[in-house]
Image (cartoon, rainbow, N blue to C red):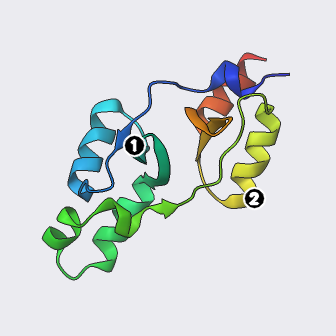
């Protein structure tokens, strides 16, 4: 059985809570990632995703204002996380029941990785 430690990514895309939507989108684009973790002094505050970019643009009457607004306005605060020793099946259950595609991995209170639906699909394809 595949465990998260085996499939998680450790090259994390992180942004400061003061980052704008544009800055976060740029960081995500460069890394070819669908999300960025909002981190301050090593503490995970939230997760900012492609869906949040879409909400920012759709809910604003002015796209320029949406692009420069802070990620903290659009991020999911205190995101659901999973431990590195959980199984891929457990992670998939959490994602499907929560309706999201990215799951931060925490180990004893420290952010150690990220697992996505794509990572899980690849692990299943290899089995």
Give the mark nearest the N terminus, 1 or 2.
Answer: 1
- Per the rendering, the mark at residue 97 is 2
Image coordinates of residue 66 in percent, x first then y, are 23, 69
Q: Seen from this angle, which residue lies furthest bottom?
A: 61
- The residue to which callout 1 is attached is 41
**With respect to residue 123, does 16 lie above or below?**
below
Total marks drawn?
2
Residue 45, visible in the rendered structure: yes
Tell me if mark 2 has few (under 14), some (14-19) or many (20+) residues whose alpha carbon lies within 10 angstroms of its own: few
**With respect to residue 92, does 8 lie above or below?**
above
Element class at badge 2: helix
Q: Seen from this angle, which residue lies furthest front?
A: 41
Residue 14 location, quadrant? top left
Residue 115, visible in the rendered structure: no
For the point 24% across and 43% down, the residue is 26
Element class at badge 1: loop
Image coordinates of residue 7 in percent, x first then y, are 65, 23
Image coordinates of residue 36 in percent, x first then y, are 41, 45
For the point 28% across and 69% down, the residue is 57
Image coordinates of residue 114 in percent, x first then y, are 56, 35
For the point 50% across and 62% down, the residue is 76
């Amino acid at each position: 059985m595949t465990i998260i430690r085996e499939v998680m990514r450790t090259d994390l895309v992180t942004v400061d809570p003061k980052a704008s939507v544009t800055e976060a989108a740029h960081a995500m684009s460069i890394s070819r990632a669908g999300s960025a973790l909002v981190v301050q002094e090593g503490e995970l505050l939230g997760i900012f995703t492609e869906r949040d970019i879409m909400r920012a643009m759709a809910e604003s009457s002015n796209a320029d204002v949406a692009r420069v607004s802070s990620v903290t306005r659009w991020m999911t605060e205190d995101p659901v996380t999973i431990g590195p020793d959980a199984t891929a099946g457990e992670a998939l259950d959490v994602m499907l029941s929560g309706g999201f595609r990215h799951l931060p991995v925490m180990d004893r209170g420290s952010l150690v990785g990220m697992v996505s639906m794509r990572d899980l699909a690849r692990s299943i394809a290899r089995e």
